[in-house]
Image (cartoon, rainbow, N blue to C red):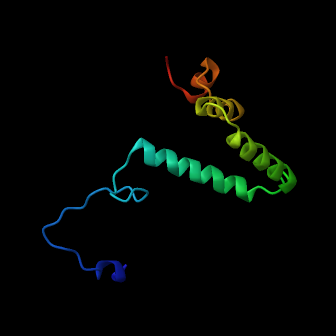
Amino acid sequence: MINILAIPVKQGHEDSLAWHYDSRGLFSVKSAYHVLVDKREQEKERQPGESSSTEQGAETKFWNSLWKVDCVPKIKQFLWRLAQNSLPLRMNIARRGETT
C-alpha cells in the first residue's frame, strides 16, 4: 500500500478511462471484435488434437490452389465465405444477433 501511495502523480490532470487494446486508448466495436477474435484463436491453440496437421496441410493446399484459379475475384470470395459460413443468410444474421 505504501508503494502505491509513493507513485508520483501529475498535478492538474484528471484521471480518464483508457481501453488498453487500442493504441489511442479509445474503445471501439472494431477493437473489441479484434480482442474477441484473438481470444478465440488463443483458445483454439490451447485445445489439443482438434485437427491433425495433415488435415490442415490439405486445407491450406486447397485454398492456395483456389486463390490461383483464373476467375473473377468475387467468385473466390464467395467460395471462401461459403466455406466459412459467413454469407449474409438469414440464419447467419440471426446467429450474430443482427436484425434486418
Residue pictured at 62% horizontal, 33% vertical = 77
| Quadrant in which the N terminus is drawn | bottom left
Which residue of the protein is positioned furthest toward the front in this rendering?
70
Query: Quadrant location of residue 66?
Result: top right
- Whether residue 82 is visible to the viewer of this picture, yes or no, is yes
Q: Residue at x 49, y 16 (%)?
A: 100
Q: Quadrant of residue 88?
A: top right
Residue at 34% from the left image edge and 78% from the top image edge = 4
Is residue 84 rendered to the left or right of residue 16?
Answer: right
Q: Is residue 56 left or right of residue 9?
A: right
Q: Residue at 61% x, 20% y: name it.
A: 89
Q: Picture coordinates of residue 56 (x, y %)?
A: 80, 51
Question: Relative to residue 32, is residue 8 drawn left or right?
Answer: left
81 vs 29: above or below: above
Number of callouts in the render?
0
Rendering coords of residue 34 (x, y %): 51, 49
Which of these two is toward me, 23 or 95?
A: 23
Task: Residue 46: give x, y in percent of width and height.
Answer: 73, 59
Up the image or down, 67 lies above or below 6; here it is above
